[in-house]
Image (tube, rainbow, N blue to C red):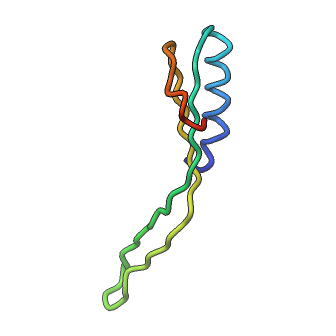
Amino acid sequence: MGRAINKTVMIVESIKRRIADLHQNTAVGSTDKTDTWEPLEEGLLPLETTRHVSMITITLSKLELDKSSVG
């Protein structure tokens, strides 16, 4: 998720170079993450922020994967 996507893709490409005949299925999406902070002082309301985070799921397999999948 987020900033780790670049490293994930680099690792998958490295694995694909080392192991022959791998099948790959990739899914890209996003999700909303909500962070909540409780105030240190009494009488204040908790602070909530929502952020949009990108994510990628890469499945590698020696067996054939679902061909109807877009990725």
The quadrant of the image that shows the C terminus is top right
- The percent position of residue 52, horizontal first and vertical second, equals 56, 63
Count of residue discs: 0
**Residue for point 53% across, 23% down:** 60
Residue in the foreground of this view, choosing between 40 and 6: 6
Identify whether 13 is placed above or below 6. above
Residue in the foreground of this view, choosing between 20 and 7: 20
Residue in the foreground of this view, choosing between 35 and 53: 53
**Residue for point 44% across, 76% down:** 48
**Displayed quadrant of residue 8:** top right
**Displayed quadrant of residue 5:** top right
Residue in the foreground of this view, choosing between 55 and 45: 55
- The percent position of residue 50, horizontal first and vertical second, equals 50, 70
Q: Residue furthest bottom?
A: 43
**Residue for point 35% across, 84% down:** 41
- The percent position of residue 49, horizontal first and vertical second, equals 49, 73
Is residue 21 toward the left or the right of residue 59 in the image?
Answer: right
